Amino acid sequence: MFSNIGASVVSQYVPAKQEKLLSYEGGFKLPVIGNMLQFNGAAFYYDYTNKQVRTKIFDAVFGLVERLINVPKSRVWGLEGEIAARPMSGLTLSASATYINSKVSKSFSTFNGSAIYNTMGYTGDFKNSKLPFTPKFMATADAQYSWEMGRVRPFVGGTLVYQGSSNSTFQNDVLRADFFRIPSYHTVDARLGVSGANDSWRLSLYGRNIFNERVITATTFYQDAYFRMRGKPTIYGMSISVRY
């Protein structure tokens, strides 16, 4: 597969192999007290061969340049759970969480004869590194209350999102890349509005990241400068939807 990297040299466009994934999953759904309470859970295991990722190779003219390569063997396993409750008429509560454990499971130091570098500029065997951009823990909590008011149904709600820390490049206990760590963050969204009968139409006012949390989504190095990509700041807006 060819990448969409903005390349400086032709060698950055050497195609990577197609990746292969064997996925194993199992779970349950458990309603309690006549659907007033719902528990869902699942476990999964992903076995990757030739997983495609971006990393760095060395060029004699331009130095470290980006390239799409294959990780020979890697795996991801995890657990996820969800709980939803309706303790009273009009009130809906829900929460979910996911734990992910990722690892390069086979020796990984070269690709097509070229040494592999992480974004920090280190090369060597990246076996046991986590996969880039793979946080260990993520969670979401949501609450909404709605009530009848004549022919319309007002509602108010909010959502809390948490994402754990990760790294934008490969690293292990020997080959570090701490500068490229993506810190954990949490955001809070809020909404209020009104809907018609059977939710045939809906008018909503919303606020996203209402406490203006500083969110970093990626860190990288290009030419001679380090970059941190920022998530969106506080956003307020309005939406209208119609079902027909």
Image (spheres, grey):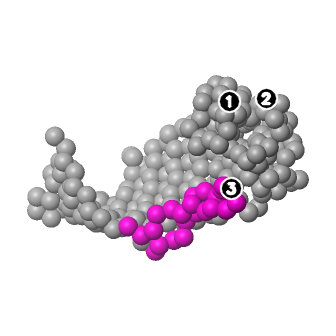
Q: In the image shown, does 185 or 133 lie closer to the viewer?
A: 133
Q: Is residue 131 left or right of residue 84?
A: right
The disc, 2 or 1, on the residue closer to the chain's N-terminal end is 1
Q: Residue at x 51, y 57 (%)?
A: 140
**Identity, as a three-letter code, of the amino acid under mark 2:** Asn
Instruction: Provide residue 82's location: percent of width, then percent of height.
Output: 52, 49
Task: Tell whether 219 sits left or right of 59.
Answer: left
Magenta span covers which residues? 211-235
Instruction: Determine the residue positioned at 64% across, 50% down.
Output: 133
Q: Label 2, secondary structure: give it.
A: loop
Quadrant housing the C terminus: top left
Dot label at residue 112? 2
Image location of residue 232, percent across then percent down: 46, 63
Residue matched to label 1:
14
* Neighbourhood count class around disc 1 (C-alpha, 10 Å): few under 14, some 14–19, many 20 upward: some
Residue 102 inside the magenta-drawn segment: no
Which of pointers 3 and 2 lies earlier in the amino acid sequence?
A: 2
Res 139 quadrant in image: bottom right
Q: Amino acid at mark 3?
A: Gln
Taking the image as shown, residue 45 lies to the left or right of residue 113, namely left
Q: Residue 223: which disc? A: 3
